[in-house]
Amino acid sequence: MQQSAVPELAHTHTRPIHWVATATAVAGVVALSSILQPGSATAAQPATGTEATSAPAVAAPPTTTGVTFPLDCGQVKTIVAKKATGDLDGDGRPETVAVVHCDSAMGTPPDGVYVLTHSAGTKKPRVVATLVDPKDRLTVTDFTVRAGAVTATLLGYSTEDVPSCCPDLKTPTKWQWKGDAFIRSTPAEAHSV
């Protein structure tokens, strides 16, 4: 074995003192960083003679509380199963879309889908459109309001003979405001479940 021409350096072998020095340095950095904090941020003030403008206030969407839905539930109450908000008609004010059914102890009651807006000049919500009528015996799933459109999957029945427990049709559906009405679009064929 040939000897190295360079003498062995003392610092190439770690000793306990090296570990103690490293631990002390790390502890010092952590302690110092917890004491020294950046200053709080300050907002720049507008220059003299200019006015700061704020974003326009967005109106609150209508609530479903206290709304009488066009749904005949007899002695049982109505249940708002799902709701979502969005500006459906492009007027800058949000509407609320609610999926509503009768409170039934058994089975799956059919859903109704209603669009709510504020009455003119008041904050009182009112139903302005029925997208799904409960008389059609449909159940609403995958319900969303996005980009000015209402989308849902409708579960229904191909004939009156199909039991209410077991819908056999599944139809993806979309509603959009066009002119003065909600227009429903669906694929050419409904899909079986």
Image (cartoon, rainbow, N blue to C red):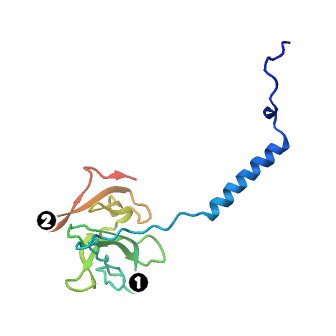
Q: Which mark is residue 37?
A: none
Q: CA distance from mark 1 to mark 2?
A: 34 Å
Mark 1 or 2 closer to N-term? Answer: 1
Q: Quadrant of residue 171?
A: bottom left
Relative vertical location of residue 28 with respect to residue 54 in this rendering, above or below: above
Percent from the top left, x then y, of residue 7?
81, 23
Q: Nearer the viewer, residue 93 or 88?
A: 93
Relative vertical location of residue 64 with respect to residue 143 in this rendering, above or below: below
- Identified by mark 1, the residue type is Lys
Quarter of the image with the N terminus is: top right
Q: Looking at the image, which residue sits at the far left?
A: 179
Q: What residue is pinned by disc 2?
A: 179
Q: What residue lies at 37% left-to-right and 65% top-to-bottom?
A: 140
Q: Quadrant of residue 66?
A: bottom left
- Identified by mark 2, the residue type is Gly
At label 2, counting other C-alpha atoms closer than 10 Å, the crowd grade (few under 14, some 14-19, many 20 or more) is few
* Picture mark count: 2
Q: Quadrant of residue 33?
A: bottom right
Q: What residue lies at 34% left-to-right and 51% top-to-bottom?
A: 191
Percent from the top left, x then y, of residue 62?
31, 78
At label 1, counting other C-alpha atoms closer than 10 Å, the crowd grade (few under 14, some 14-19, many 20 or more) is few
Q: What residue is pinned by disc 1?
A: 77
Q: Nearer the viewer, residue 100 or 61?
A: 61
Q: Nearer the viewer, residue 112 or 64?
A: 64
**Judging from the image, what secondary structure is the residue with disc 2 in?**
loop
Percent from the top left, x then y, of residue 89?
21, 67
Q: Is residue 104 left or right of residue 19?
A: left
Q: Nearer the viewer, residue 159 or 117?
A: 117
Of the two numbered discs 1 and 2 in the rendering, the one whose residue sits closer to the viewer = 2
Percent from the top left, x then y, of residue 53?
26, 72
**Judging from the image, what secondary structure is the residue with disc 1 in?**
loop
Q: Looking at the image, which residue sits at the far top?
A: 1
